[in-house]
Image: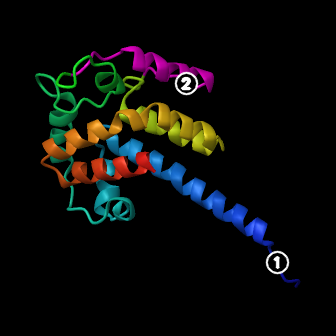
Amino acid sequence: MSEPAARTPSEENDATDDAFESARTATYAVLAACWREPTERLVEVANDGELSALFGPLESLELHGLRSEYARLFIGPAGPPCPPYESVYRDREDDDEFGEVLGPATTAVERWYRAFGVEHRPEQRDLPDHVATELEFCAYLGEHGLDDRLDQFRDEHLTRWVGDLCDRVEAETRSPFYAALARTTREVVAD
């Protein structure tokens, strides 16, 4: 049986770069799933410790409590304290008030999606500029090897508002999970 051919330093660097890009893409996908309405699968994955590499150790989660906190933070009975939509942060006239949903920032995000053939699915209840949808789009760009475009989208959109969202979540949440999600998202988007 012959020995495998030795890899050149250039080939090893390419493999390392591919691994890093794959990890970055997976990170965006995991963060996107965590910003969606909580599911049994999310609770299972978190309680099995599968998110600890990304978030650090987490307390045991319970679906009902996580859904209640999600609703309080992001849906709210009288307007949420932490709306998860880009337009609310970017299209406001006053830093003390939220802008309207479905504003110019939403239109700009939709142009990006259309340019890459990505359509907003009718079964998806969230708006196109929801933080999870934008993170999913970053994962999509990464999966297709469009790292320069991913960086451009992140710089034109996520970096301009996610810090504000994450600050609000950290200040408002009663859940260590959402505090960890906000911290991690801020770090990943800023990277």
The residue range painted magenta reads 98-122
Q: Position of residue 64 (x, y in %)?
A: 17, 44
> Residue 147 appears in which quarter of the rendering?
top right
Say which residue appears at 35% left-offset and 27% top-offset.
86
Residue 162 part of the magenta segment? no
Outermost residue on the front side: it is 94
| Residue bearing mark 1 | 6
Left or right of 16 on screen, residue 41 = left
> Residue 20 appears in which quarter of the rendering?
bottom right
3 over 158 or under it: above or below: below
Left or right of 148 on screen, residue 74 = left
Q: Position of residue 159 (x, y in %)?
A: 41, 38
Q: Nearer the viewer, residue 46 or 86?
A: 86
- Is residue 96 shown to the viewer in this render? yes
For the image, the number of numbered tags is 2
Q: Position of residue 49 (x, y in %)?
A: 33, 65
| Residue bearing mark 2 | 112
Element at label 2: helix
Q: Which quadrant is the N terminus positioned in?
A: bottom right
Element at label 1: loop
Say which residue appears at 28% left-offset and 19% top-offset.
92
Q: Nearer the viewer, residue 44 or 80?
A: 80
- Amino acid type at circle 1 is Ala
Say which residue appears at 85% left-offset and 83% top-offset.
3
Residue 104 part of the magenta segment? yes
